[in-house]
Structures are given as C-alpha cells and as structure tokens.
Amino acid sequence: MKPAPFEYFAPEKIDDAVELLARYGEDGKILAGGQSLMPLMNLRLARPQVVIDINRVTALDYIAQGADGVLAIGALTRQRSLEHSAVVKDHNPVLAATMPLIGHFQIRNRGTIGGSLVHADPAAELPAVSLALGAEFVVKSERGERVISAEKFFLGSMTTVIEPTELLTEIRFPRWRPGSGWAVEEVARRRGDFAMVGAVVWLQLDGTGLCEETRVALFGVEDRPVRIVRGEQILLGNRPEADIFAEVAEVVAEQLDPVSDVHASREYRKEVGACLTRRALQTASGKVGKGVDP
C-alpha cells in the first residue's frame, strides 16, 4: 500500500521545526529515521496530514561528553553512529553494547535514537536502557524547553509525555562511574527481531564490594519498560552473589504483569523474564569496572 496524502516540510533549523509543530499540532508528525513511521504510513495505520522531515536539521546530530561527564546525544543521531562511537564505548558501555541488538544494520543506518525513544515500542531496547540508566530527555516547543526523566517519559505502548507541539532534541545519560557492572539480555525469534522478553541490569558497587546502587529494567513484557524496584532493594547492601540473584529473579516473576499474544504467553514472559534477570545479574557482576567486551 501507499500512504494517504500529506503535506511535506523539510526544515533545516530546530526553531523552524518547532514552529511547524506549533502551527500544525496533532496534524503534524516528525520524520527522523522513518524506520517506524514509514511502515505505519504505508499500511495507513498512521495518517498524518503533515510530515515534518528533520533530517536536514544537522544541529540535532551529535555525540558529546560534557565537563560533568554527562553523555549528551542529539535526537537525530543514527543508531549506527552510536554503535561505532568511541565516546559512547568509553563513557556508556551498556548503551554501546545495546546498539547491535536493534534490528539489522540497514535499520540502524537510518534509525535514530530519538525516533526509537519517541516511538516507545514496549519491545524496543533503547527505552529500557534509558530507564535503567536514569536518562533525561530534553524537549523543545515555542514555550521553551523542559527536561523529562525516563521514569516519567513513557506512558504506555507507543505513548510518551511529549506533547504534539514538542520536539525531542537531546538525550542525556548520567556520568559513568568506576565500579559499575552492566548487562543486556534478550530473547527474540531471530537476531534483529523485536525482543519477546529482555532485561537491562546496572550495578554500582562500593569499595567493599557491596551493591550501593542498582537498576533492573525489563522490556517486551508490559506496555512500557518497567523497573523491578523490589528486586533492586534486595540487591542493595549485599554482595552480588547467586543466592541474591535467585531471590531477585523470584521477585521479577511475581511482579511482572505481562500479556499473552501471538509471540509468547503470559507465563512464558514471566518465567523467561526471571531467567534473563538472573543471567544479566551474573554477567553484570563479572563486568564491574570493565568497558565493552572486545
């Protein structure tokens, strides 16, 4: 099929894109990488009256580390650029390790970090990683800018707090600290497919080897990425060991409230979610202080 008729704009500046969003509101749709929007338009599941193509807005394509160690990424930055960035590998190894799991390289050549986050597919990797790492999102409108935490950004399946007149401009990941361990695990039918179940784990140990800060996030299980807060609390103050990991996995199985669909049953997702969490915790504990695997 072909998309329904629409009006097309290709601004070259952020302010011009924001002005178009203010003018057209809910009738407008941002086109970045197009890896999600174009299939929906071709199937006529999405019928925007106006498409605002921001690919010429080069000011949104960058990877930078600030003086405070925060990793700032422009919303238009291609996923492939993140995958091969030395800055990302050095300053956020879990993000670098996640990129090869996203689709196939042809998709990552065009797909953008901002597009994936705004699309908010519950089975996508980047929303879960942003939640696990405590990322922040900068959005801009004619009223000004606001910064939104990952905790508040995702509302449900393909739904975020971004208003129709707002443009995501930047994603900020906190400074990577020594003593961190991490892992990303997922199960998909084929490499490159959306995950049926996935887990992202981040551990911060103190000088004595005890967990002083933890994040456990799962994706592909509910209508948005979810943190397992009770499991994180079990880890705090304990050494990262197998019996603790098993206890966290039990909490995951209890807390998850997945749905059954054509890809997997509710019971499958609960059991596999617990298994992947335990596996990710084991991997993360072995990576404390290390960067990306060779």
Image (tube, rainbow, N blue to C red):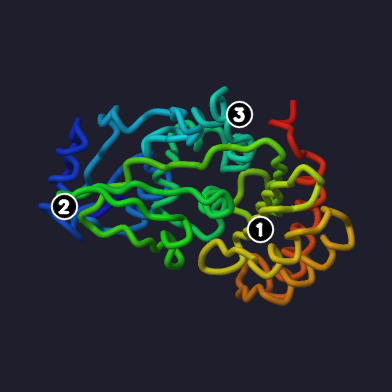
Q: Which residue is at the far top?
A: 86
Please identify the quarter of the rendering in which residue 114 is found. top left
3 or 2: tag closer to the N-terminus:
3
Residue 168: percent from the left, percent from the top?
32, 46
To which residue does mark 3 refer?
89
Identify the secondary structure beneath mark 2. Answer: loop
Which amino acid is tagged 1?
Answer: Val
Label 1 crowd (10 A; few <14 / some 14-19 / many >=20): many
Residue 68: percent from the left, percent from the top?
47, 33
To which residue does mark 1 refer?
216
Residue 13: percent from the left, percent from the top?
19, 32
Which amino acid is tagged 2?
Answer: Arg
216 lies above or below 91:
below
* Left or right for 240, reference 206: right
Residue sitting nearer the eye, 111 or 289? 289
1 or 3: tag closer to the N-terminus:
3
